[in-house]
Amino acid sequence: MATLLGQCHEVLHEILSNVLPGDLSNLSLSCKSFHTYIDGNWLLWRDVYLKNFDNPLIASQSDKIDWEDQLKRITTLEKLLKAEDKSIGDTELQACCETISQLAITASLQYESSNNVKFLESQLSQKDNKNLFILASNLFDVAREQKSTKSQALSNALAKVHCLYGTGADQLRSTGPHINKDAPPVRAHPYARSRVYDLRLYTEETKWGPWSDDGSMAVDWEKVECIMIDLAFNFQYITDRTHALMDVPWRVPFKGAQAGSYVDTLREEAPQLQSSSQDSQNDGLSVLLGQPDPSLDALDPYGVTGNWQRIVCFLDYSDFYYFNFSSVPPLTQRRPANYFQEAIRLILMRLHVTKIEKQGAGDMPIVHFKGTSRSMHQGWDPTSTSAIKGTVQLTPEKEVRWSTISTFQGEARWRSEGVQVGGIRSGRGVFGNWFEKDHDENGPAGPTAMWKITDQIDKNNSLTWRRCPHGGIQLASEGVEIAMPDLQSDPNETSDDEWEEVSESEEVIEEEPEEESTHSSSDIESKASGSGTS
């Protein structure tokens, strides 16, 4: 009788390539013959990988992958995700975070059919796993009033997983994996807001942005996580209040968190708009072949030209000043939760490439751009329209860095620094910080995000904001409409009844106390009114 090991290699390969990833490792340990055949057989490991997960070579900048090592890492992660006992050392937990991040950024751009996304979402939707990986950085330990023992590197890895995963209203609170599961959930956003508005984190080493404080320009993912949570909460508050249909690109788990995942939502609906020559997801300079005089858009690997949506949040300057200067705790100590209510601005930006420097970090160019920034709050915002310019380039660790300067009446006023989550041309967009142009040590500063909505060039101004019958504002182009909220009244002018109603819809446990500010002055009012269109 023929035995399994007696089959020719081609037949044995075909049989073993249908084995589950975890079982392949176990087979390798079962006997010497299996070990000899399986160990180091990169073709077998590759085929097993590709039958269960998306091809990482499509998104990878390298043409070499250790298939065996990658599959064993995924197997280790899967065992932890399915285990009842989630106890694990920090080193192993950080390695699992890196595996999740790798699966997320190499997921297929066909989101609905991505094996990576299906695997991650099915496992991380479970409460214990979500609390272990998604709601687990030092921020959440502080929110739970637990003393965190996590290293900064581990907290950063956990925060990155959360940033790639995204966040919605149901992900802004957590019970934690190692405490009473019947305990009421805690809210993270007051603690995220505390980090976002803490001026001590805005330094020359961090470029006043979401970067590490060692000057290396590495991403501080916990800062990005705090920005995302704060903006998500504020946006949820606004959309609940206005019943708007506008959406943001971080609500769906892992969607848009891959390089090249941006999709032009208006291309098919508004064919009268002119293309910005970004029809292909090119890799940069490869489009130059056979083109003696390519356009700047063809040279731009980052996909700058087009229309972008932006969110800016800020505190009333008197609240901002009180929060930062009423007490100054040691640098090693976090500030307490911040319950001040923020204002929110929704902005439409029209950007175009003006210059390209051919050599930047990682052999990628530095792209310069200019454009206009127009607030949706034109009815009462004195700084509703501004000019904007900036650059896009890679950092030393190959993250995408966006830097902008906003100019009012010919004078530079606000700057911003941000990182594009997911990489070049990701649909998730950019999270970062805005601040005063000269890095004023007294502020103001705050969170911002931007994402591309179309790369069509609206030269005829057919793409405009229009008021619609239901009271909202729509981004429209000859009948093409994307619903947007009506924010013509100040978001700070909200009654207690309205706030309680919104809180109930979000299942918020604790009330947001109102803070009375006693630090107003004409100078403060001037600063507060101008911080909306950074």
Image: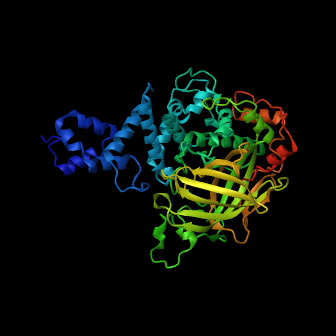
Q: What x and y, as percent, mark residue 368?
A: 60, 64
| 299 vs 54, nearest the viewer | 299
Q: Would residue 277 be visible to someone looking at this image?
A: no
Where is residue 128 drawn, in percent x and y? Answer: 51, 29
Which quarter shows the N terminus?
top left
Which residue appears at 78% of the width and 52% of the height? 472
On the question of residue 32 being in view, the answer is yes
Indicate the colouring scheme.
rainbow
- Expressed as whole percent of the image width and height from the top left, the position of residue 147 reads 57, 24
Question: Closest to the observer: 410 or 193?
Answer: 410
Residues 347 and 388: in front is 388
Task: Return the x and y of residue 393 as percentages of the image width and height.
Answer: 55, 58
Which residue is more in the foreground, 459 or 437? 437
Find residue 38 and report its image quarter.
top left
Q: Which residue lies furthest to the right in this view?
A: 522
Count the labels in the image.
0
Side of 149 where 36 appears, left or right: left
Q: Residue 141, located in which quarter of the rendered image?
A: top right
* Image position of 227 (left or right of 483): left
Residue that lies at the very extreme toward the bottom in this rendered image = 292
